Amino acid sequence: MSSQDIPEENLPAAQDTSHGAVKPADEQNPFADPGLPPHEPRVQDIDERAAKRSERTVALLFTVSMLATVGFIASYVTIPVDKSVYVWPIGHISALNFALGMTLGLALFCIGAGAVHWARTLMSDHELADERHPIEAAPDVRAKVMDDFRQGAKESVLGRRKLIRNTMFGALALFPLSGVVLLRDLGPLPGTKLRHTLWSRGKLLVNMNTNEPLRPSDLIVGSLTFAKPEGLEEHDHGFQTEIAKAALMLVRIKPDDIKDRRALEWSHEGILAYSKICTHVGCPISLYEQQTHHALCPCHQSTFDLSDGAKVIFGPAGHPLPQLRIGVNDEGYLEALGDFDEPVGPAFWERG
Amino acid sequence: MKKLSARRRHPLAALVVLLLALACTGGLYAVFAPADKAQADETAQSLTIEEGKKLYTVGCASCHGTGGQGTSDGPSLVGVGAAAVDFQVGTGRMPAATSQAAQIPDKPAVYNQAQIDQLAAYIASLGAGPAIPTEEQYGPEGADAAKGGELFRNNCAQCHNFTGKGGALTHGKYAPSLEGVTPKHIYEAMLTGPQNMPSFPDTTLSEQNKKDVIAYLNAVNGEETESPGGLSLGGLGPVSEGLFAWVFGLGALIAVAVWVAARTAKAKKS
Amino acid sequence: MSTTTTPESRARGKAPAGERVADWADGRLGIYSLAKANMRKIFPDHWSFMLGEICLYSFIIIILTGVYLTLFFHPSMNEVEYHGSYVPLQGQLMSEAYKSTLDISFDVRGGLLIRQIHHWAALIFVAGMFVHMMRVFFTGAFRKPREINWLFGFLLLVLGMFTGFTGYSLPDDLLSGTGIRFMEGAILSVPIVGTYLSFFLFGGEFPGDDFVARFFSIHVLLLPGIMLGLVVAHLILVFYHKHTQFPGPGKTNKNVVGMPLLPVYMAKAGGFFFLVFGVLAAVAAIATVNPIWSIGPYRPDMVSTGAQPDWYMGFSEGLIRVMPGWEINFWGHTLVLGVFIPLMIFPLVLAAIAVYPFIESWVTGDKREHHILDRPRNAPTRTAFGVAWMTLYFVLLVGGGNDIWATHFHLSINAITWFVRIAFFVAPVVAFIVTKRICLGLQRRDKEKVLHGRESGIIKRLPHGEFIEVHEPLSQEQLYTLTAHEQPKPLELGPEVDENGVRRKVKASEKLRAKLSKGFYGEESQIPKPTVEEYKEITSGHGHH
């Protein structure tokens, strides 16, 4: 039933009949439910002047909203999109963004505030109660539904004609496969793509900053330089995909300080070329501390000791950074002596 | 040219030539000619070094050794160059309170610029190293901020954050915020690689590159930098944004919800 | 409708226009039956019941602003050179996606505002869902008949996280690209199929040319479509079940006390939509969010420190950051446990809270409907579990932001990581124990209050010199509110020997259930609430005050 039919004054007691019928002044049970407290009027309910004040407040809020919308449109039309303004304490900000946001915010907020103030002060604030009914169906309804279902199931002869049932399930189970098959062309098969980079024997190490090939004398002890393979240009199609594997980090450490024998052999007079791509999940790792020779990954803090074959000394990476074997060509430029001998970047199932 | 020929007769001419060969030419000027002395004559120059040595003996020798040869408490300063001195002392990192901390922080400079120049001149006289850069090298003229941005993201952002707000390194070390650091000091830091920062010599990060980086920093992290969207929330990315969304965004909405759901004040019974 | 039923006061065919339209619609849609049940539906008033509305409205705002953004956004990874209005990126190569986002921010009037509202609303939407879920959890509002709606809500939270993540990735900036790279690394760690999944998702090697367009359809079509359906279902169930209410005088399990939908809630809820929208617009005017122009276009060989995802993915970032780097190589294969274990714990953390209602109902064996909310203190085990879960979540958030913590609190990043590694196991246990103790303490205090009244703060000196504090007796409303909750008995295993003397086989699951049930309702998990006898004994006179 709809609660609007109930006279307000009857509500608490009327509702309580469903609840053990304890009367508020029950001497036997001091913890009994006293029922809904009586309604107390608000100022607006008994003082028409207060109600008028509320009405005016609501109207004022709605009016402010209208003005704010006018302000929004005016701002949109008059303020240039690139105008900067200093607003204390926010700083130098876009005048248009601030004006549009504040006017829109004000326009919307005032509509909301007006509506809520209206509801809170002028609409009836009598608390009402609705009854709840159990969600579960009554036993007879349940029985009827079950009977209907059995009847329907029987009439479908699905239980008896097993052949129909089995082939139907088979068909329904198989057809989604078409959808799965259709996904095949989302991408090529991996093949050995993750195992190779653009580096190969004789490729020069090109400075990322100047786009010039590097000489050993360019790199001083304690410096950090990033290099790409010769011939890979930023405008090339596929640059992003190639650099994602080929990016190189060059550091120079005094040969005496290099602990790992192989790393020293693969270096050129202490110039070590490591993959810039973290072996954890592939962030470009390059927070190089030149005194400790540690390289830290900014994403997940894997730490590699570049003086010791880039071994992992902290964090979630599972194996050292691959090192590129480098040498110097006849013209005195640094060159790769082959591709990395292991896949760069994050580990994967087929990596081995 | 006139200045150069005047200096040719200087007792330290050989050193000057060596410095010229190793470092960029312009930076040298500042070492030998403090702002108020356009004409640096021999006496003034040796006086400067003399003064620098005095300052050094009082303030630096206890850690770096009487001749700058270094001790267990401080590295050798032979060959670090004037740029390193200007950076370390100019940013207040030197003199350091202790050599035991994870990292020596910047603080208000203890020496004034004239004294720093004297110290720098003295250290530069111990062995050749990068000279203090000139305004021409780090100034905004001819700089490409966009190229600088690319260089910054490649070489610097990994430690100093997208716009130079700083970041964490291992074991309590950190890359400091670059906010408010003068272009000269940024240039010197790139050139000399202070503490654990790697160096970016001109051979790998050219003078023009450095200029571009500084121009970029000035564009995105200068005093006049605009943050079009409003409060930049420290420029730290999603962590501070998330905090703001929770505290101020959701906080404000819950405050509004409390008002919407609150009982209206009842009239007092009289 | 037949005109014969028209009241006499109304002339033939002259019913007000509104009524005629309503009649027309009723004849086709049956709106009157719908309105009869719902127009004066009662909603209880409590601020915490509006948390869900915050989420609903942010969701609507996200859709509105999102549609606007699609008008200007180009979901393409074609490389273009930038020549727009933002100077520090002039001449830089970037994807069209990134360029169009710059254009939205700098060249479309109001574009920046809409973008910021969209992003702030997304952050607040997920935060709102989180708090809403915690409200439902701690008050036990998930109990029968609302378990399915709990699951709908949970799914909305999870989908909201992934919709947010895909949206955050669309501008193809350096920060989100780093996030995508992480995702690729995580997919690669999946045994056997990982490499294939990654190649299919990215259309080849990372980053390729496809993911922005693919994420775009997922972000604007697939996930929001599912979410919209779930939101509607969620709301229908809220209407159908009727809202829960806190215990109090006149409030029973068989009624719902509050204000009617028309007019009060129409105005309050409708108004609240505008309030939420207004606040979000103001936030977007004041604070910048995801300033992609300072972040730069994505290049897989570049990165910035402080690389974090939006906050709702922060706990997964914590998981991945604190995990040790375990990797097993065998027979030419690699098992990347250092990445794969966090990837598996990630859904488990979420599932732990999602399945709790079913575990609780199994343990307690409670099959009744519940419409009166629990005060958290009266369900100490549940409350303690919730706090333990939130503690775990927060610890992982700390792990996810360990670099920011390190720089702002001058700590070592390694020390924070180790702290999180240990706290991951220890902190939830400690939080559980402490919370349970606090709940029991509060129950004791409630009991004191019921039996001895409220401490009035007035000190009285008795004739023989003793000082006592006067306790004011509680009103009946308060007495009822404090004693209305149930205190079930723990489940018993039953006799191990049946009536014929044959030993009954007790299943292990039954034993576990009895043990857990003791944990929920045993002597150490609840303070017996005051009985009427106790109360009467104390108040009937031989109590001194």
Image (cartoon, coloured by chain):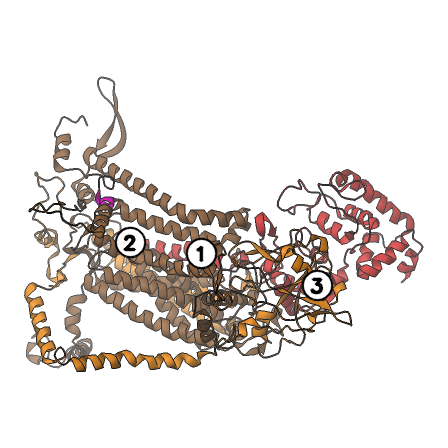
Chain colours: A orange, B red, C brown
What's under tag 3, amino acid-wise?
Lys
Same-chain status of marks 1 and 2: yes
In the picture of the structure, the residue carrying the numbered disc 3 is: B210
> How many residues crowd mark 2 within 10 Å: few (<14), some (14–19), many (20+)?
many
Residue B30 placement: quadrant: bottom right
* Residue A57, percent from left and from top: 32, 59
Magenta stretch: give its range.
Answer: C518-522
Depicted C526 relative to depicted B175: above or below: above
Q: Which mark is residue C319?
A: 1
Kindly identify the residue that appears in the image at 82 percent across and 49 percent down: B121
> How many residues crowd mark 3 within 10 Å: few (<14), some (14–19), many (20+)?
many
Which is more N-terminal, label 2 or label 1? 2
In screen coordinates, is A237 left or right of B32?
Answer: left
In screen coordinates, is A67 left or right of C464?
Answer: right
Same-chain status of marks 1 and 3: no
Label 1 chain ID: C
In the picture of the structure, the residue carrying the numbered disc 2 is: C137
* Residue B70, percent from left and from top: 76, 43
Kindly identify the residue that appears in the image at 18 percent across and 52 percent down: C365
Q: Tell me the distance, in whole angstroms, between the alpha carbons under discs 1 and 2.
A: 24 Å
- Per the image, is A268 magenta? no
Kindly identify the residue that appears in the image at 62 percent across and 73 percent down: C90
What's under tag 2, amino acid-wise?
Phe
What secondary structure is the stretch in magenta mostly built from?
A: helix
Label 2 chain ID: C
Task: Tell me the SS state at disc 3.
Answer: helix
Q: Identify which residue, C499 or B53, lies in the foreground.
A: C499
